[in-house]
Amino acid sequence: MDLFVVRHGESPFHAGSDHSRPLSPRGQVQAGKSAQFIAQNCLNAKTHIICSDALRTMTTAKIIQQHLAAVQLHSDRQYYNALTGEWCDAILAHRHFEKLILVGHNPTMSTLSQYLIPSKSFQYKPACVGHFSLEIAADGLKLPAHFNELFSPDAIQ
């Protein structure tokens, strides 16, 4: 399975609810660049997106979805404060997909990536995408995963 671990795009801090924070205009551009990167790696593949139900992650996930053909998106409140183990359970539950895209929050996305590859340190900036190749055995994830790339939309002009 190809796994894409995505942090949501830039979101301004404001006095409202953390859960309802939108993407900033820059965050929308970042998400678009990340979506293009993911789309280049998901051509004609059975792909699924899972995200937190926070506004900024759902918006990021929907921008990604717009760049992919016939991809289902599943958002759930449980991923808002999910720990690494809950994301791993989601990976296992969706093992039948060729490509899986997880859109969430930091530090959890960095921590999940570190769990997949303990020998590497990850720091996810807004809209960064970790691309991993992952084997799933009958008894669970085969670790370490293979690290392909950490894409940063801010590195592209």
Image (cartoon, rainbow, N blue to C red):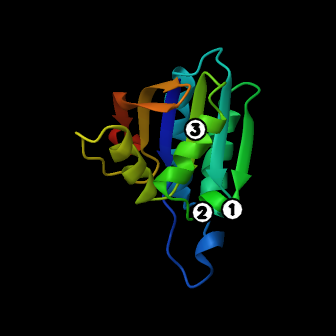
In space, the residues marked 1 and 2 are separated at their CA atoms by 5 Å
Say if residue 36 shows up in the picture. Answer: yes
**Residue drawn at x 62%, y 79% as measured from the top left:** 17
Helix, strand or loop for disc 3: helix
Residue 77 - label: 1
Q: In which quarter of the image is residue 24?
A: bottom right
Say if residue 8 shows up in the picture. Answer: no
What's under tag 1, amino acid-wise?
Arg
Answer whether labels 3 and 2 touch (C-beta < 8 Å): no
Residue that badge 3 annotates: 91
Counting other residues with Cα less than 10 Å from the Cα at mark 2, is it few (<14), some (14-19), or many (20 or more)?
Answer: some
What's under tag 2, amino acid-wise?
Tyr
Q: In this view, does 16 lie to the left or right of 135?
A: right
Residue that badge 2 annotates: 80
Q: Which of the marked residues, 3 or 2, is nearer the chain's N terminus? A: 2
Of badges 3 and 2, nearer the viewer stands: 3
Residue 61 - label: none
**Residue drawn at x 33%, y 46% as measured from the top left:** 114
Furthest residue to the bottom?
15
Furthest residue to the top?
44
**Residue drawn at x 66%, y 53% as measured from the top left:** 58
Q: Looking at the picture, how far across and down is residue 38, in whole percent? A: 53, 30
User: In the displayed structure, would residue 62 be above or below residue 15?
Assistant: above
Most foreground residue, 67 or 124: 124
Helix, strand or loop for disc 2: loop
In space, the residues marked 3 and 1 are separated at their CA atoms by 16 Å
Q: Is residue 17 left or right of residue 87?
A: right
Answer whether labels 1 and 2 touch (C-beta < 8 Å): yes
Most foreground residue, 79 or 72: 79
What's under tag 3, amino acid-wise?
Ile
